[in-house]
Image (cartoon, grey):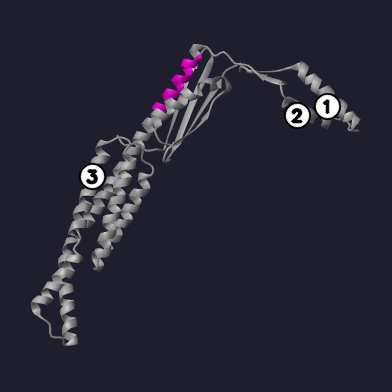
Amino acid sequence: MVKSMTGYGKGEISFAGRKITAEVRSLNGKQLDLSLRLPPQYRQWEYEIRNIVARSLSRGKAELAVTLESGQQPCGATIDRDYFRDYYRQLAALGGEMGLEMDSPGTAAALVPAILRLPEVVRSEAVQVPDEERRALMDAVAVALDAINAFRATEGAALIADLLQRIDTIMSLLDGIAPFEAARADAIRRRIRDQIEAMRLTVDGNRLEQEMIYYIEKIDVTEEKVRLANHCDYFRAVAAGEEDAGRKLGFIAQEMGREINTLGSKANQVDMQKAVVEMKDQLERIKEQILNIL
């Protein structure tokens, strides 16, 4: 099943008066670019969560945010009062020696955040998270990933329906070229003969016919039509039967573009050129949509 790279999913798990909420969003991207936001006590499982998300989403620019709602949040850090007092006394003494007004409210307000950034003042402590809470966290992430994948599948179905409709349009335009091909060959023969007559040249009829056949063969588009039709059939088969088909569909679209460009360079007929322009327009829209497919 083809999926879109754009999606949203949310998972909520409640336990022991708390609620863990996981929200994941994704946009299109060539590789997986994951931004992860976790409460401090859950960062010990960041690597495991990243692996779970990578296996589920594969590609895209994704953001996973986990929040914890509870009446009491664990701090996970303590302030060493002795270090704080010692730093403060030293800074106050140094400020006095320099003639600074250390007793002013502004100075005190500036000192506190500065001291908190000094070594050993704030110490982080590992917060013990019970197994029940860890399981709730992983369950919330799993629910959010299931939701975003369901969203991606729905979006992917809509994208594929649009792409296949455009492939049908290209094939219809390709089939419509046939009447203009025969008329083009006749027009080329008439134009060459009219120019020879206008110049009053005497030419060998057999040699002239051979040269005209050679020229018409050079601008024959049968090979390009066959290859383009095959690419369209392959596009349909991949879209219908493969997962994570975005890259392969992109490669097929590139090959389609080569055949359409060659067909346009050989067209040499206004109606055929109009059809080629319409094909190019449809193909560009296909390429834009493929960028959103996983």
x and y percentages locating residue 4 in the rendered image: 37, 38
Hey, which residue is sitting farthest left in the picture?
206
Magenta residues: mostly which secondary structure?
A: helix
Query: For the residue carrying disc 2, how many other residues have a C-alpha within 10 Å: few (<14), some (14-19), or many (20+)?
Result: few
Nearer mark to the viewer, of 2 and 1: 1
Which residue is rendered at x = 33% and y = 36% of the image?
A: 244
x and y percentages locating residue 16 in the rendered image: 52, 12
2 or 1: tag closer to the N-terminus: 1
Location of residue 40 (image quadrant): top right
x and y percentages locating residue 193 in the rendered image: 15, 79
Where 114 sits versus 211, above or below? above
Question: Mark 2 and 1 residues: CB-CB less than 8 Å, in contact?
Answer: yes
Which residue is rendered at x = 27% and y = 36% of the image?
A: 242
Where 82 sits versus 47, above or below? above
Q: Is residue 121 left or right of residue 204?
A: right
Query: For the residue carrying disc 1, how many other residues have a C-alpha within 10 Å: few (<14), some (14-19), or many (20+)?
Result: some
x and y percentages locating residue 231 in the rendered image: 24, 48
In the picture, the disc for residue 91 is 1
The span shown in magenta is 133-147
Which residue is rendered at x = 27% and y = 45% of the image?
A: 164
Query: For the residue carrying disc 3, how many other residues have a C-alpha within 10 Å: few (<14), some (14-19), or many (20+)?
Result: some
Q: CA distance from mark 1 to mark 3?
A: 75 Å
2 or 3: tag closer to the N-terminus: 2
- Label 2 belongs to which residue? 114
1 or 3: tag closer to the N-terminus: 1
In the picture, the disc for residue 234 is 3
